[in-house]
Amino acid sequence: MPTSLIDALANRILIADGAMGTMLQAADLDVDDDFQGLEGCNEVLNVTRPDVVRGVHEAYLEAGADCVETNTFGTNLAALGEYDIPHRIRELAEAGARIAREAADRWTTPDRPRYVLGSIGPGTKLPTLGHAPYAALRDAYQENAAGLIVGGADALIVETCQDLLQTKAAVIGSRRAMADIGRTVPLICHVTVETTGTMLLGSEIGAALTALEPLGIDLVGLNCATGPAEMTEHLRYLSRHARVPLSVMPNAGLPELTADGARYPLTPDELAEALDRFVNEYGVSLIGGCCGTTPAHIRAVSDRLRGAAAGPRAPEVDPGVASLYHHVPFAQDASVLMVGERTNANGSKAFREAMLAGDYQACVEIARSQARDGSHLLDLCIDYVGRDGAQDMRELAGRFATASTLPIMLDSTEPNVIEAGLEMLGGRCVVNSVNFEDGDGPGSRYARVMPIVKEHGAAVVALTIDEEGQARTAEWKVRVASRLIDDLTGRWGLSVSDILVDCLTFPISTGQEETRRDAIETIEAIRQIARRYPGINFTLGISNVSFGLNAAARQVLNSVFLHECVQAGLTSAIVHASKILPMSKIPDEQREVALDLVYDRRREGYDPLQRFIDLFEGVDAASARASRAEELAALPLDERLKRRIIDGERNGLEADLDLALAERSALSIINDILLEGMKVVGELFGSGQMQLPFVLQAAEV
Ligand code: THG
């Protein structure tokens, strides 16, 4: 039995090959015969000119590569679709893997195995931008992966990733292929970080790691777009935080444009030196080259590093979720993770009405205002009786994916609605929620939603509900939470930190005897669960506790209850963030009575609930903060128009333009105001402070 790739990597680094495309271009090939008339479709050579492809593999193996990558970068839906041969994905992938397999086997000796990495290029269709549906891409990647595995690949390498949703489709498609064929191979995943410092759609490296690692990849890393120097910071992040081993394949520097095309400046020795540093300082285990690297580069790398061991790493995992853009840790310094509650068709009239009217832009505005209000995450709930939930979820999650910088908590009781959301969001979501309401047996909601959670690598809210109903006492809540945690970690392989236990609280504002102790039991359950499961996370729908009271009273009770829960160990809360008051801002008496209400401190002649209601009789919830619209309206006209461009804010744009036209010419408005705004947008983009989708929005306005 030859040593597997993963076993080999545990002992020493492995060296992969360099560029394929440029080597093929150098061969003397005929468009009609060799390319079957499909000029530039390198993958066709896997069937027409296996000798040429094999020659490239041989050159790299001869130069000292331990691994060769198959000539299958374009066996995907986008690339073969361009040539009208998407039905040949599997055939060309399998042919490519066979050629590499033969070459690798020919060079394999008992003490030096050589490996085949099945290359899965992303293609140019970006699902986050709506170029193709997630499911179509995933299924095509599955075909691709199946061909590579059957053709003999030792591992799959999903590389040059630009859009995290596309990457997710490729990784999940690959996993499905392995399950289908019954053969599991290691999965390597490389993202491409542009010179701007993010992936093409604006994803930071932290977002990429958080989204991809829970998908069950075996190595994570970087390739293409830049040389090693520009990759250093991103690699440092991966080295510090990734649980899995690292892989890096840089270009031979940043290309310089010359009269005869791109020239890559890094010499073989310079590449080898840079990779030496990556191996030793950052503990990288798999290295190789991308654009502009040649057998001479790989020879230099092999001469310098063959047989080396990766430097030590002691990664600090930072559990959390991610939007398309950023990683958001569950642990917030000196605070609690705020989950915005208003993007909810049941919890906000404004949101519901906008959704029912199909005014998705208004829904996006509510999401944005939640972000400005201080939310770290958004709870998205579109459940509404009689609607096509999956369709509503696709519409809204698809827009939130790019328009909001916050990660999403998908709130639905329907597994197909949850899945529809996950298929639109490239970051890492929280699924809200699972429970044991109808048990955990076959066909239960729990059994139906968990495979979806697992496949997408989501975190999950676990509600303390079992076959007997919603747990009402601390003992019962702790018992159900323990059962959920044990099953989620034991049977489903989640980490404790990926679970957000929700101890659920009924309103304590109704005066009914049976709900008086609800807050107490919840606080006590949080305390016990936090003690029993170090690293566990929590969430809680705080506003539930105060239903029925007036707005001013709710604000105080919600804030006091949240404060007590956080003291007990609560890590996140579903709230209207800007309505939460710090304890210091609540008058003493209001706070004391709220505490009496929370802890049910009734005495002879004193009912804190009655007292609390009396305290807030006729009090308005003072909305001191001027609304966003008022802020904008307060600006002088020129500034306001400029601001609209920068913010991508079109509500009321026509009226402002009419006003401006009364004062000056259209050309002057464009040149002196609108272009000024775009200039600021350009600067923000150039300095990495604004992501591409917001730039597009500004340009649209
Ligand atoms: N646990 C989990 N998820 C949840 C809840 C929970 N999701 C939904 C809900 N509970 C949390 N979200 C809200 C959202 C809004 C309100 C309460 C909880 C709310 N809305 C006002 C009202 O209904 O009076 C405002 C209405 C409006 O503006 O129209 O109170 O417990 N895991």
Image (tube, grey):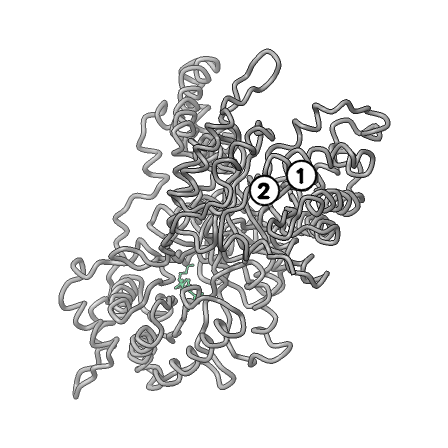
Image coordinates for residue 550, horizontal then vertical, percent: 31, 65
Seen in the image, is 581 located left or right of residue 191?
left
Q: Is residue 365 above or below residue 414?
A: above
Image coordinates for residue 123, horizontal then vertical, percent: 65, 38
Disc 2 marks a residue whose amino acid type is Glu
Query: Which residue is at the front of the view, 75 or 462?
Result: 75
Query: Which residue is at the front of the view, 300 or 476?
Result: 300
Kindly identify the residue that appears in the image at 49 percent across and 54 percent down. 11
Image coordinates for residue 678, horizontal then vertical, percent: 44, 24
Seen in the image, is 561 located left or right of residue 76?
left
Query: Which residue is at the front of the view, 33 or 425?
Result: 33
Q: Are marks 2 and 1 in contact (CB under 8 Å)?
A: yes
Disc 1 marks a residue whose amino acid type is Phe
Q: Is residue 532 above or below residue 81?
A: below
For label 2, the crowd category at 10 Å Cα-Cα, with few meaning under 14, some 14 to 19 and many 20 or more, is many
State the SS at label 1: loop
Point out the tag, 2 or 1, that comes first from the N-terminus.
1
Q: Locate the N terminus by quadrant.
A: bottom right
State the SS at label 2: strand
Q: Which residue is mark 1?
A: 73
Q: Is residue 1 above or below residue 240?
A: below
Whether residue 97 is visible here, answered yes or no, is: yes
Seen in the image, is 416 located left or right of residue 584?
right
Q: Is residue 430 above or below residue 190?
A: below
Seen in the image, is 390 located left or right of residue 151?
left
Mark 1 near ligand 1 (CB under 8 Å)?
no
In the image, which disc is placed on residue 159?
A: 2
